[in-house]
Image (spheres, rainbow, N blue to C red):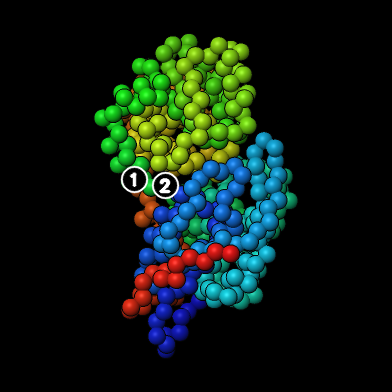
Amino acid sequence: MSTRLDPNVSPRRLRVALLHNIISPHVVPLFERLALQPGISLKVYFLAESDRNRRWATAIDRKFAYEVLPNWAIRLGRKDLYTFFINPTIASALIRDRFDVLISVGWDSFASQAAFILCKVLGRPYILWSGSTANEPSWRRTITRPIVKAMVGGSAGWIAYGTRARDYMATLGADPSRVAIAYNTVDVDGFAARADALRPQRALIRRELGIGDGPTILYVGQLIERKGALDLLEAHRILLRSRADAQLLLVGYGPLEAELRRRIDADAITGVKLCGHVAIPDLPRYYVAADCLAAPSHEEVWGLVLNEAAACGLPLVTAEPVGAAPDLVIPGTNGYVIPPRDPVALADALNRALDSSEKMGAASRSIISRMTYDQNVEAIVTALRRVTRASFVPVSGQTPQSAGRDRT
């Protein structure tokens, strides 16, 4: 499906509606850059401001137009939170704003599904942007598969987080040759610059964090079962047999904290520090203090901590189900990919990564250098061009997103 702006009337910007679940500090800079693209008028519709398992800052200073939709939330899961947002005003909001093309980040919300139907009714292109992979089995995925296949097959275009997400969308009906890859990412340049500025203070930072002289492994993420924190604790216990001075920093919060503390005390595991929640601007201090990042998740759509750590120059040790693994880790070059739920393999990989920390960290920086917001914008614009015939020519006298923000 494509849409054409009438060539007989004055050119105007392409009105792009974008659905996103919650306000994340990682996506806000991307949307700011996308809003500045010539010929595009972007409005982002957030399904909610935040969720119970997030402690992110949600302030946006009017650099792109957005609206937080009224919502109801259905929350499931005791070990890992899953939230299904219901936004009853999504159709009326989209009709009111007279969009030309719609991009939906994900397919598992009422808003994404309602918007898909609305696009079909109005004859507007629907672009599906997804990070889902084949490594996330669940009862929800099983029962919704027919709906998801209909949405994927009926989309005018597709955007994927990485190669694994592209391949999964292909199994659902997307044309893999027409899937634009916008690598899920963070402010790579910002993290790198902050790390470079802090690196001369590494010894001081380690003292302030209470770290000794030994090699240090860093974990950043929620303390929940699927993130593999218990596997990492056991791997650290194994590693202590050959590296008695090894240290493990656990940055994050969640229901597993009490169990982690119990095991540390019961098994007298040394060199472990639970750091609690750390705000994103402060994370580079921990990356600079560490010698290796571990992300041993049993299931992970992507894993943005890998991007952050790579930008800060760390080796990466992650598990095979992690969505970012094939794009961000070259085994033996900048880290290792191990089977999930295997503390012995994890300990061995960490040991090898620590032996080559500086060399592998430099390789991580080289790999992550191509996964930037600029690359994301280029991929999104490519997807838009594929489903529209708009020229993306800016209108004289207008500035991107002069309307500011709307909130309801």
Using residue 354 as the reference point, say whether residue 255 is left or right of it. Answer: right
- What label does residue 186 carry, if any? 2
List x then y, in percent, for residue 138: 68, 43
Using residue 367 as the reference point, say whether residue 98 is left or right of it. Answer: right
List x then y, in percent, for residue 14: 45, 74
Q: Quadrant of residue 262?
A: top right
Report whether residue 349 is seen. Answer: no
What's the distance in space between the residues labelled 2 and 1, CA to CA?
A: 9 Å
- What label does residue 35 carry, if any? none
Tell which of 194 and 132 is nearer to you: 194
Residue at left 59%, top 58%? Answer: 47
- What label does residue 190 carry, if any? 1
Amino acid tagged 1:
Gly
Q: Secondary structure at mark 2?
A: loop
Tag 2: Cα neighbours inside 10 Å, few (<14), some, or many (≥20)? many
Residue 208, above or below 400: above
Tell which of 221 and 407 is nearer to you: 407
Q: Secondary structure at mark 1?
A: helix
List x then y, in percent, for residue 114: 66, 65
- Which quadrant of the rendered structure holds the C terminus? bottom right
List x then y, in percent, for residue 185: 43, 47
Total residue callouts: 2
Q: Nearer the viewer, mark 2 or mark 1?
A: 1
Using residue 238 as the reference point, say whether residue 10 is left or right of it. Answer: left
Residue at left 63%, top 23%? Answer: 259
Q: Are marks 2 and 1 in contact (CB under 8 Å)?
A: yes
